[in-house]
Image (cartoon, rainbow, N blue to C red):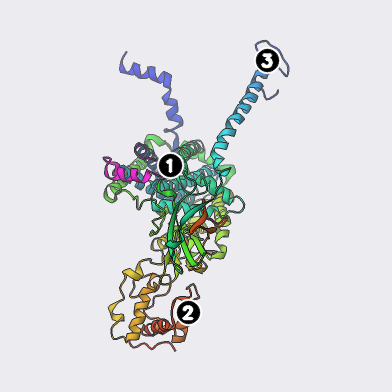
């Protein structure tokens, strides 16, 4: 039997030709093979990367509250290339979330969620949430102080849900408190349950792409009319369809390769994330911060007025997510090209700027006191020059009573309250005294912790805080 | 019956609503439904066991009263009363003990009433500060500033033979205190 004969023998049994024609070789519109359409496949490639690195990490990682942190340190410093695989897994997850978001935005801007691809969008939303779930459970896998307190924040949000809140907390933590079983539970979710769901839903997502076709590149002034669309699309494929593989796949594979190389580069250069301090709740000198996907939520929680916070968390956010699912049913036909949909474009721009501004605020967290400013940031020399002994006493008190934790001097210190460099131009001595003793406007009252003499000294010092030549407030 | 694709196509050529094959098919469905239920009940029970039984709180000795000077607030830690051997350090729970005078105490949970971050005590200014969203509390646990919707969570405590006891075992949330 010659080579050809062997090939035919296998083909007559496996029938790969017909499999190819209905899958990789399915026809797509020529103009869909665009650089705009490469993000979905790249997200999938990231997912594969995550599976491979995840399996490798699971060979060493110990999902036990007692040992997880040690096994992460072992991966970082002793297991050969452990640090690199941890880094690839971490950067891969970041890039996956980022690409998935770009994919979603692109799909929306190109109107690809409209008829007949509504279900593709809905499944995509499920995948989006599942991936965010992977990000959160993954953050818990890195079982360090941030993970421990991050879990605490998570359940504190859950507990605000009326009636079932407490039960949810117990269910999530596998008990009334964060402990061994909590980590096991999150391990199971991160390694078995959610990845399984993702594989299942990706399968449906891809089947829909194959059956309903890939979105044609939108044309200005042309909208979707459901009654005519199927015929038009069939005609388009008939006229200028090309097989996805090999003719339409070139840009996808170039981009995906670039993404993989970028991830490997980031991993090699920046290394893995953490783990930071041991997950020992008694080490309370910690400043918990979430991974970047949750920074904007973290910021929202600091900035919302307390009265509406629970309402927003429990009602507004789920409704917002529901709306995301419903987009193709709210706007499922009509114009596709972004230039014909100014409101849609504006919405995307608005949401993106809001989320990134919030995330940026989340990094700098201007609302948090700087816990070490009082002992770590010296008073600028210029502020103590030529001051009277009484005023100098005040300067000492500013440090000793932790005022600097919330108030900056010379640009250093907390930003929770206003900087004090020119406070004398804004407040009179009486106003200063009242503000210090009684607090108000989000400042605690210090009346009980300052003697009258101390208050006098403090106010005397603060009255000197104004630029040269500018008079004090009267 | 009509939805049974094998009805009327039995090898015996018996027409009618119930054939041996359609009966077996239905029996099979029924048996599988029963088996699925028998299987699902223990599985769900296993997963949801966190919700049932298990006392969530117990009285435990925290420290000797003499360890807390009157008028001061100090950090104390205890081992969570409900543990498994592989809990590791996660079962070591800190709390703030404020000794007011005599047998009067306030024992605060470490968790901020906003979203649970660990609050820190600053004795010079007499304030608890939270590192997450800038929640601040006075020495008696009342909110001084920031987003917390209520004061610090307080443990139930009692003094028994010069020892301070607290009721502990669960993470405090807005839905239920410690
Ligand atoms: S958790 Fe303390 S202020 Fe948010």
Question: Which segment is the magenta one?
Answer: A58-83
Q: Which residue is mark 2?
A: A437
**How far apart are the alpha carbons under marks 3 and 1?**
57 Å
> Along the polypeptide, which appears first: circle 3 or circle 1?
3
The residue lying toward the viewer, choosing from A292 and A20, is A292
Quickly name the residue at label 3: B20
Q: Are discs 1 and 2 both within one chain?
A: no
Q: Is residue A407 visible?
A: no
Q: Secondary structure at mark 2?
A: helix
Say which chain tag 3 marks: B
Q: Residue at x 42, y 32 (%)?
A: A25
Is A62 included in the stretch rendered in magenta?
yes
Q: Are marks 2 and 3 on the same chain?
A: no
| Direction front: furthest residue | B161
Mark closer to the observer (2, 3): 2
SS category of the residue bearing label 3: helix
The answer to whether marks 3 and 1 mark residues whose Cβ atoms lie closer than 8 Å is no
Pinpoint residue B17: horizontal percent, then vertical percent. Answer: 73, 19
Q: Which chain is disc 1 placed on? A: B
Q: Residues within 10 Å of mark 1 (few under 14, many from 20)?
A: few
The local crowd at label 3, few if under 14, some if 14 to 19, many if 20 or more residues have their Cα within 10 Å, is: few
Whether tag 1 and tag 2 are in contact, CB under 8 A, the answer is no
């Amino acid at each position: 039997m010659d080579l050809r004969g062997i090939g035919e023998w296998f083909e007559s049994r496996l029938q790969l030709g017909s499999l190819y024609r209905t899958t990789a070789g399915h026809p797509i519109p020529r103009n869909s093979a665009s650089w705009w359409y490469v993000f979905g496949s790249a997200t999938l490639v990231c997912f594969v990367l995550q599976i491979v690195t995840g399996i490798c990490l699971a060979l060493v990682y110990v999902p036990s509250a007692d040992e997880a942190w040690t096994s992460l340190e072992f991966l970082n410093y002793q297991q050969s290339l452990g640090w690199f695989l941890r880094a690839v897994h971490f950067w891969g997850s970041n890039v996956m979330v980022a690409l998935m978001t770009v994919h979603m935005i692109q799909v929306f801007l190109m109107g690809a969620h409209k008829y007949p691809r509504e279900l593709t969008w809905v499944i995509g939303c499920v995948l989006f949430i599942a991936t965010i779930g992977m990000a959160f459970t993954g953050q818990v896998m890195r079982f360090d102080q941030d993970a421990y307190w991050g879990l605490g924040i998570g359940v504190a949000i859950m507990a605000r849900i009326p009636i079932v809140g407490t039960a949810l907390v117990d269910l999530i933590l596998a008990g009334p408190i964060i402990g061994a079983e909590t980590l096991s539970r999150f391990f199971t979710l991160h390694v078995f349950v959610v990845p399984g769901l993702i594989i299942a839903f990706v399968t449906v997502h891809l089947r829909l792409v194959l059956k309903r076709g890939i979105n044609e590149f939108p044309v200005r002034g042309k909208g979707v009319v459901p009654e005519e669309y199927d015929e038009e699309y069939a005609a388009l494929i008939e006229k200028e369809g090309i097989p996805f593989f090999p003719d339409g796949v070139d840009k996808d594979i170039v981009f995906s390769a670039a993404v993989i190389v970028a991830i490997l580069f980031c991993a090699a250069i920046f290394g893995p994330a953490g783990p930071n301090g041991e997950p020992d709740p008694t080490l309370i000198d910690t400043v918990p911060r979430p991974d970047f996907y949750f920074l904007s939520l973290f910021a929202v929680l600091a900035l919302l007025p307390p009265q509406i916070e629970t309402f927003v968390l429990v009602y507004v956010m789920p409704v917002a997510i529901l709306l995301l699912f419903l987009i193709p049913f709210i706007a499922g036909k009509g114009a596709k090209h972004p230039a014909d949909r100014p409101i849609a474009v504006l919405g995307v721009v608005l949401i993106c700027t809001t989320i990134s501004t919030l995330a940026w605020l989340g990094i700098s967290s201007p609302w948090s006191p700087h816990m070490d400013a009082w002992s770590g940031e010296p008073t600028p020399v210029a502020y103590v020059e030529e001051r009277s002994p009484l005023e100098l006493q005040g300067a000492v008190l500013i440090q000793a009573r932790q005022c600097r934790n919330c108030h900056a001097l010379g640009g250093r210190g907390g930003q929770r309250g206003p900087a004090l460099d020119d406070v004398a131009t804004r407040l009179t001595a009486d106003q200063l005294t009242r503000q210090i003793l009684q607090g108000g406007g989000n400042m605690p009252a210090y009346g009980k912790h300052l003697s009258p003499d101390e208050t006098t000294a403090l106010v005397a010092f603060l009255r000197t805080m104004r630029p040269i030549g500018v008079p004090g407030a009267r | 019956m009509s939805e049974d694709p094998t009805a009327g196509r039995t090898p015996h050529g018996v027409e009618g609503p119930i054939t041996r094959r359609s009966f077996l098919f239905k029996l099979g469905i029924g048996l599988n439904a029963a088996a699925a239920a028998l299987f699902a009940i223990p599985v769900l029970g296993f997963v949801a066991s966190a919700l049932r039984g298990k006392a969530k709180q117990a009285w435990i000795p925290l420290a000797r009263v003499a360890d807390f000077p009157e008028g001061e607030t100090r950090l104390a830690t205890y081992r969570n009363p409900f543990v498994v051997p592989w809990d590791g350090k996660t079962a070591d729970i800190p709390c703030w003990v404020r000794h007011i005078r005599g047998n009067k105490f306030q024992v605060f949970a470490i968790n901020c009433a906003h979203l649970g971050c660990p609050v820190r005590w600053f004795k010079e200014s007499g304030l608890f500060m939270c590192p997450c969203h800038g929640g601040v509390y006075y020495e008696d646990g009342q909110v001084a500033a920031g987003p917390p919707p209520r004061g610090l969570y307080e443990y139930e405590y009692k003094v028994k033979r010069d020892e301070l006891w607290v009721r502990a075992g669960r993470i405090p949330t807005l839905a239920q205190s410690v």
